[in-house]
Amino acid sequence: MTFPGSATPVNTASAATREPPCTTAQRGEIAVALPMRHAGVQAVALRYELQGPADAPVVLVAGGISAHRHVSASAQFPEKGWANELVAPGRTLDPARFRVLAFDYVAADGRLDVPVDTADQADAAALLLDALEIGRLHAFVGYSYGAMVGLQFGARHPARLRHLVAVSGVHRPHPYACAWRALQRRAVALGQLQCADAAGLALARQFAMLSYRTPEEFGERFDSAPEIVNGRVRCAAEDYLDAAGAQYVARTPVTAFLRLSESIDLHRIDPAAVQVPVTVVAVEGDRLVPLTDSVNLVEGLAGRGQLRVLRSPYGHDAFLKETDRIDLILAAVLRGTGAAA
Amino acid sequence: MTFPGSATPVNTASAATREPPCTTAQRGEIAVALPMRHAGVQAVALRYELQGPADAPVVLVAGGISAHRHVSASAQFPEKGWANELVAPGRTLDPARFRVLAFDYVAADGRLDVPVDTADQADAAALLLDALEIGRLHAFVGYSYGAMVGLQFGARHPARLRHLVAVSGVHRPHPYACAWRALQRRAVALGQLQCADAAGLALARQFAMLSYRTPEEFGERFDSAPEIVNGRVRCAAEDYLDAAGAQYVARTPVTAFLRLSESIDLHRIDPAAVQVPVTVVAVEGDRLVPLTDSVNLVEGLAGRGQLRVLRSPYGHDAFLKETDRIDLILAAVLRGTGAAA
């Protein structure tokens, strides 16, 4: 176990000085018939984005359930991506050196209303590689739900992957985290009871935010006394939570949230079944993935697993926030596998 | 700082062998005009229960927002109380040796729909002592919200109290815990939108349960795979959460929950204002009261505070679960103050 500390990242360019990459990016949509674990064969559209030179090693990047195919800005698609600080010139995942692939999760468009397993997502990724004629991924970098999908990919399609980096996601959802998500789905159901779908989804997202972040962060950001507004107590964090709920509702179909939230809880894999080298990145203070579960995963992987532990006030969201430290880990892994000279 | 370990409690009688106490208990209701911090003077009925010999030292026991005046079983009121394992023959709080007083919190009956401060509860307790002609409490034992009320009592009525034991409640609510409660109140509001008050309150309680307990406990109790029921994923903890919600809804007016939940968030007191000796009992792993806040409270109390720390898989609910260890602490405190020979 190693603890990447506060050493100066070797590879960092600040967000302010970073130029938009001049690499090419393309988007596409591929229709597939996907045999699903709990729902038979379903017709599914796989929407992907691919950025970087055609002859570079391919890295698939997969995020949490609200992530999507647009990982980072490019000349063609200049809007900010969900991992804009990690996939960028000057970073390990420089799209001039790697070809970065990402896809919208099956069910993310809200059109597929059946139980979705992480195994289904892994099989969808394999079908996508077939269609794009990519034989083998140099690496699969998965965060949260994406780490779970990556573990399934490493178990079901090991020949198509050199190395997996699994950040803040392990072989099973923790029972406490399952309960937390089940209640979020109940908030949605309560909203749906009265055609207040948006209100229910916003509340679900707000509760989810508490699981993604930490008391330490809230303690620093929202330490002022509550106000009494119209005879009701309003806490300091409520403006932040309102914004988080509204932003999520604007971009997320209710059905997509429900099915992908369920999908996390359906995830369950024997670590021994994962047949590729895995770097497991755990965050101390992650309220969804306890460190003990990451340790158990690495033990189950036997010689194929190595553990890196971060301490972060951002908890489960550290991947999106501690980008300098995550980049250091990616640098060690991707250099260690012999590519990216 | 001391860590009461797993030493055999000196004072324990198992629940199975404990006899119902033969001490007398009485209940009453006293009408008072209560000047409230945020709501002017309100007519309030104070409902109390008092158990034990008339000449014994009086100990006020105050629990969480869902606690009430019936702390423990007696000949007159034989049903189980909310702290039945702590106030019992053979325990430190033996009703043959102490006179145990408890009251229903102001607003707990759901009839008072205004912001309620912990200072209001402390003043209500003082009015109750007046009415019962009790000059001074031997001790105030408060748990969770009751600890907050006890701190206010020690600041506002120090002459009426020898010693405060504040368990799992400190001088302020933590901002993260405030956010958690604010969202619970939003669940109630979502239910109220269309007369699904019970469903909203049940969901609020279920979310609250996650804050009272710990991942460790859930990991041990609910570690089985989810089921797919009617096309929906159902997690292992959901039966437990259903029961917790239904039980709470059956006994709690919605308004009482809202106003007492708010009251926790309104609580805020300068530790230096508390003018009595305080034993602060903190639980490592409490998801609502971080250990650092308990340490800050003790530092603020200067020479008047001492800290005891428990480790417990029950988190915030340790007071109700780790009764042998809590009893050891109470024994040390109540003997140390020279009573209870």
Image: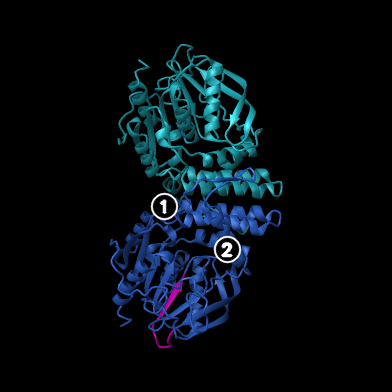
Chain colours: A cyan, B blue
Is A274 rendered above or below residue A216? Answer: above
Residue carrying label 1? B216
In this view, B117 is above or below B101: above
Residue B54 lies in magenta, yes or no? yes
Residue A166 on image: x %, y %: 42, 32
Side of B227 where A279 appears, left or right: left
Q: How much space separates mark 2 and mark 1, taking CA atoms?
A: 23 Å
Q: Quadrant of residue A198?
A: top right
Location of residue B114 with respect to B159 vertically, above or below: above
Is A110 covered by the magenta stretch? Answer: no
Name the residue at 48% across, 31% down: A152
Determine the chain carrying the residue at label 2: B
Q: Residues within 10 Å of mark 1 (few under 14, many from 20)?
A: some
Going by the image, does B192 lie left or right of B177? Answer: right
Q: Nearer the viewer, residue B68 or B217?
A: B217
The percent coordinates of residue B273 (x first, y second) are 39, 66
For the residue pair B94 and A18, the one nearer the viewer reads as B94
Q: Position of residue B36 (x, y in %)?
A: 55, 69
Q: Quadrant of the C terminus of chain A?
A: top left
Q: Is residue A134 visible?
A: yes
Q: In the rendered structure, which amino acid carries the disc numbered 2?
A: Tyr
**Pointer 1 chain:** B
Q: Nearer the viewer, residue A270 or A286?
A: A270
Tell me which segment is drawn in magenta.
B52-62
Check disc 1 and give the amino acid type: Glu
Residue behind mark 2: B248
Quarter of the image for the N terminus of chain A: give it. Answer: top left
Along the polypeptide, which appears first: circle 2 or circle 1? 1
SS label for mark 1: helix
Which residue is painted at 69% across and 49% down in the image? A193
Disc 2 + disc 1, Cβ < 8 Å: no
